[in-house]
Image (spheres, grey):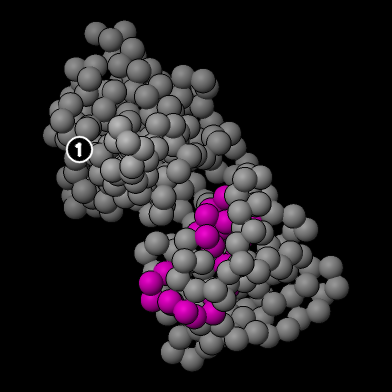
């Protein structure tokens, strides 16, 4: 199967790229291994996307609230399909370039070819890499509050992390229980100031700085955590029903290994302002890109620029 443009990943960057590519009259195929939206789909309330506001009638009454991340993802997906983009649900096991054409080999044995590719595979949650984490994932350990929070209504929860995601997800969980402890290894949270203030103002969230989780313990499910003070070194054990981990992300740039794509020291793909990589016809957008702000709005902008650049590249070849 051939196309003009292959897009790997259907997060906000990939979905926006699909829309802009299809509108440029390109045959676009998006390859996604899970479902449209990526990490966008698990955002509780998408309150900081421009224009995503409550809808009011003439009397000022709310007729529709803010879209959730899932709703926004489904709208992006439907919009891309309406413009003519096609979707395949599989994973890419190998991406290679022979001459001027790229070939994507899928896990199900299919192959797709195109003169241009946009990698928008995003990133995945970074593990704490502590004893008990792998054993209890899905048994009290989660990386998604909107996915698993309802299992722990009224329960005691530890949240690990200090960035935007940790503060956002702690707030989401705080609607379900008043027993949340947010632990962060540094002496200040690193989220946006507004999120930090909301976290401290929330009576259901207790913040403990200079604290790390050293081990997660339990039997058939999580029972407790070992906490260490990063300054004194003191270690204590506390009971808990769940641990939600938001310790950053790792780029899903494994496909870069077979193409000699330039990466930064953390494994993110290096691009210029046009989203071009060091390989002609190959572009990157969204969270996988080095230097990205890693917000939905910037991912969408990356996707639009990548598709525009890809269309220009294809036109030049013709």
When asked about the image quadrant of residue 245, the answer is bottom right
Instruction: Looking at the picture, tell me which residue is in the foreground, 312 or 96.
Output: 312
Location of the C terminus (image quadrant): top left
Residue found 40% across the figure and 21% down from its top: 305
User: Measured along the vertical axis of the image, is residue 311 above or below residue 152?
Assistant: above
Residue 256 visible in the snapshot? no
For the residue carrying disc 1, how many other residues have a C-alpha within 10 Å: few (<14), some (14-19), or many (20+)? Answer: some
Q: Is residue 156 magenta?
A: yes
Seen from the viewer's position, the closer of residues 318 and 146 is 146
Estimate the x, y position of residue 139 in percent, counting from the top left. Answer: 42, 80
**224 inside magenta stretch:** no
Q: Residue most toward the right?
A: 232
Q: Residue at x 43, y 77 (%)?
A: 152
| Residue 224 x, y percent position in the rendering | 58, 85
Q: Position of residue 146 (x, y in %)?
A: 40, 62
Which residue does the numbered mark 1 point to in the structure image? 78
The relative height of residue 172 versus residue 106 in the rendered view (above or below) is below
Q: Which range of residues does the magenta coloring cover?
A: 149-171
User: Is 106 displayed left or right of 255 in the figure?
Assistant: left
* Foreground pick, 186 / 58: 58
Figure check: 52 above or below 231: above
């Amino acid at each position: 199967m051939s196309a003009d443009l292959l897009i790997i990943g259907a997060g906000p960057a990939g979905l926006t790229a699909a829309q802009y590519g299809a509108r440029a009259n390109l045959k676009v195929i998006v390859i996604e291994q899970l479902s449209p939206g990526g990490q966008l789909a698990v955002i509780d309330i998408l309150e900081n996307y421009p224009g995503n506001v409550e809808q009011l009638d003439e009397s000022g009454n709310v007729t529709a609230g803010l879209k959730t991340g899932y709703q926004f993802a489904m709208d992006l997906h439907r919009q891309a399909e309406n413009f003519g983009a096609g979707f395949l649900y599989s994973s890419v096991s190998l991406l290679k370039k022979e001459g001027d054409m790229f070939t994507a080999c899928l896990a199900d044995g299919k192959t797709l070819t195109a003169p241009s590719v946009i990698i928008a595979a995003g990133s995945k949650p970074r593990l704490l890499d502590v004893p008990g984490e792998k054993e209890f994932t899905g048994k009290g350990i989660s990386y998604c509050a909107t996915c698993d929070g309802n299992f722990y209504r009224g329960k005691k929860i530890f949240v690990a992390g200090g960035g935007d995601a940790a503060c956002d997800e702690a707030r989401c969980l705080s609607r379900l229980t008043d027993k949340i402890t947010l632990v962060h290894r540094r002496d200040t949270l690193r989220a946006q100031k507004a999120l930090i203030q909301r976290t401290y103002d929330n009576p259901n969230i207790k913040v403990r700085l200079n604290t790390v989780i050293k081990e997660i313990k339990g039997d058939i499910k999580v029972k407790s955590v070992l906490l260490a003070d990063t300054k004194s070194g003191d270690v204590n054990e506390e009971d808990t029903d769940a641990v939600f981990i938001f310790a950053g992300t790792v780029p899903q740039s494994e496909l870069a290994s077979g193409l000699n794509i330039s990466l930064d020291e953390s494994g993110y793909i290096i691009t210029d302002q046009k989203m071009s990589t060091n390989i002609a016809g190959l572009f990157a957008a969204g969270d996988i890109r080095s230097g990205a702000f890693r917000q939905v709005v910037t991912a969408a902008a990356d996707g639009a620029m990548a598709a525009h650049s890809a269309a220009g590249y294809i036109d030049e070849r013709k």
